[in-house]
Image: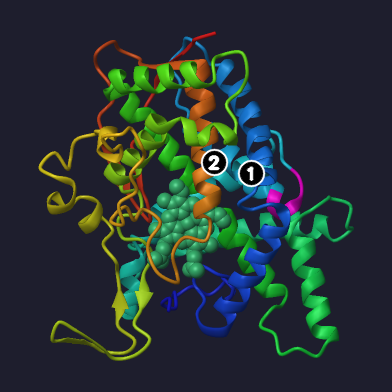
Amino acid sequence: MRRHFQMTELPQSGVVASSGRTWKEHRSVSLQILRNFGLGKNILAERIQEEVSFYISSLSECLGRPTDIKLMTTISTSNIICSIMFGQRFDYTDPSLVKLTFLVDSIFRTFQLNGVVNFIPVLQYLPGDLFHLKKLEADVQEMLRLLSVFIEACRDGNKGDNLVTEYLQELSRRKENGADTTMCENGLKRLVFDFFNAGTEPTSTTIDWFVLYMLHHPDVQKKVFDEINEHVGTEREPNIRDKPNLTYLNAAIMETQRLASIAPYSLVHTCPRDVNIRGYTIPKGTYITPSLDSVLHDAKIWGNDVMSFRPERFIDQEGKLLTPEQFVPFGVGKRDCFGESMAKAELFLYLSNIFQKFEFRPTEQGNPPPLKYHLGVTAVPLPYHVRIVSRI
Ligand code: HEM
């Protein structure tokens, strides 16, 4: 179960923060819709690949000069989720998309900070905005307003495959059949809000961390490129069918997810009933904050070099990729990440394509930016600049 957030404007539905019947129905309907669009198949990969081409063009415009790639990356990953939800992608300078991207960043930054208000609700009545609750409310309202415009634009039905139209059609079908459903207009709004946030920021932040680690480990960056060069070459773009052959890149992505541990406290759960674990009773309704860090950074699992960046730990002696069960960046159990397979396809396609075409260097030779981060819902590297050099 999820906990109930102290938010006034956000409909209590969708997938991320709902529980019980509402969660079950919204998760399964969404999964069905995304499967019809090709989740887990190459059709979705082709949509991602198309967006990656636009991203590469954008990076190409920044060659040679110090560049902060974060905004571009977030806009690009949000475009993939837009194409799924609304059946269209947007130009990187589209004012609504740029605004939405800033709002995602702001919401992820402030959500964890004001979490304390959920544990001690009386704090929300303190004067001022110490826990940024008012700011969060304003950001959420603005995001809902902008997303509602995109939702409305889907109602005329000429946007191609999209989640909004499919949801509305399924809702009508269930109503016509007299089904007892939790689906409703507010449920759609909340679903779109959930997917826009969850589907944009963690992927973009992982790419941001990967590039940062490559600045610190040029030897790893070289091996990533050499592997791409050997198995794909530079004449064609890497595609999803290359994934099984690029073992070192896959391992470097996993090592980034392990070490950066971008969702260190996952999402808060609520205990659905009294549970007894090793002699301790956890009463029904207790908030549970899973610590993914405690697994991803456990020296007993990963060895004494647990805090070093070493992709080889995910490769066995025969050169095959290892996926230990303790590799849990997407959470575990029934409420694990809904978008795991999509995120894995995105990370592979973005990173194989950009590291095939570019070398990323620190702006000051031998002096990479610090591995420091801001902790909100996710751990986001502090803004940094890179110098992008073309390999082709
Ligand atoms: C590298 C990228 C990503 C990471 C590291 C990540 C990680 C996570 C984590 C840790 C959770 C919480 C699991 C729990 O509560 O136990 C989660 C939930 C979720 N994620 Fe992701 N995620 C990523 C990308 C995505 C994408 C691309 C989507 C696209 C739709 C997505 C959609 C969701 C949703 C809807 C939930 C809530 C699931 C539920 O409550 O049933 N995520 N994710």
Give whichever of 67, 139 is nearer the camera. 67
Q: Quick check: is the Cβ at mark 1 less than 8 Å away from ligand 1?
A: yes
Residue under label 2? 346
215 to the left or right of 21: left
Give whichever of 60, 235 is nearer the camera. 235
When the figure is inspected, residue 30 is found, relative to residue 206, above or below; the finding is: below
219 to the left or right of 233: left
Mark 2 or mark 1: name the one nearer the start of the chain. Answer: 1
Give the amino acid at mark 1: Ile
The numbered dot on residue 80 is: 1
Q: Position of residue 269 (x, y in %)?
A: 37, 74
Give the crowd class for mark 2: few <14, some 14-19, many >=20 residues within 10 Å.
Answer: many
Q: Position of residue 371 (x, y in %)?
A: 26, 33
Q: Quick check: is the Cβ at mark 2 less than 8 Å away from ligand 1?
A: yes
Give the amino acid at mark 2: Glu
Residue 287, quarter of picture: bottom left
Where does the magenta region start and end? 84-88
The answer to whether residue 126 of the structure is visible from this angle is no
Q: Residue at x 34, y 25 (%)?
A: 214
Q: Measure how far apart labels 2 and 1 are at the Cα level.
A: 9 Å
